Image (cartoon, grey):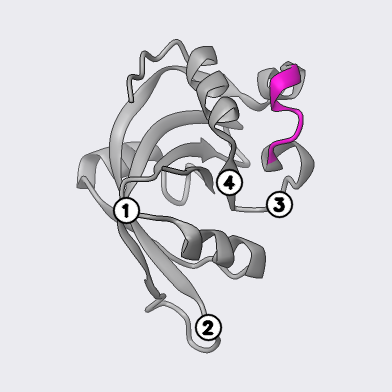
Amino acid sequence: MAYWLVKSEPFVYPYDELERTGRTMWDGVRNYAARNHLRAMQLNDLVLFYHSREGLEVVGLCKVVRTHYPDPTAKSGDWSAVDLAPVARLHKPVPLTLIKQTPELQQIGLVRVGRLSVMPLQAHEFAKIMELSETPFVQ
């Protein structure tokens, strides 16, 4: 199993909407590195949901329920989408300020490559964010 983090502006697509609909197509990614991360996602991989631009915090947990396929919103180019489904809202959102202050999280893309919208996490990084959220999680 792999771990990921995706970013969405809450005024465009908040975690509340994912919970309401129960599933979404994660589309519109137009960065090659992020696209390649989408293509690496496997069924049931766990994904942290981060609110960017407003909130600046990890707010939820979701999982991959459909692996990559051609992004139907792309007018041209070789772009991919995946489908995500909610798993749980975090008990306590984990703000970017706390992530940046946490030594174990200094190498994650959220800190190093702020503009990347889809990024991998190491298992220990995922576990640390879950710990900071005070959300029990058993694998």
Residue visible at 48% across and 45% down? Answer: 11
The earlier-in-sequence mark between 2 and 3 is: 2
126 or 53, nearer to the observer:
126
Neighbourhood count class around disc 4 (C-alpha, 10 Å): few under 14, some 14–19, many 20 upward:
many
Is 132 placed above or below 66 here? above
Residue at 60%, 61% (x, y): give it.
34
What's the amino acid at mark 2? Answer: Asp
Mark 4 vs mark 3, foreground winner is 4
Q: Nearer the viewer, mark 1 or mark 3?
A: 1
Of callouts 4 and 3, which one flags the residue occurring earlier in the amino acid sequence? Answer: 3
The residue sitting at 59% across, 36% down in the picture is: 122
Residue at 75% from the left image edge and 47% from the top image edge: 113
The percent coordinates of residue 133 (x first, y second) are 48, 16
- The residue labelled by disc 4 is 120
Q: Which residue is mark 2?
A: 78
**Residue range (magenta):** 103-108
**Helix, strand, or loop for circle 1?**
loop
Q: CA distance from mark 1 to mark 4?
A: 15 Å
Which three-letter amino acid code belongs to the residue tagged 1? Leu
In space, the residues marked 2 and 3 are separated at their CA atoms by: 20 Å
- Labels 4 and 2 touching (C-beta < 8 A): no
Q: Is residue 13 above or below residue 111?
A: below
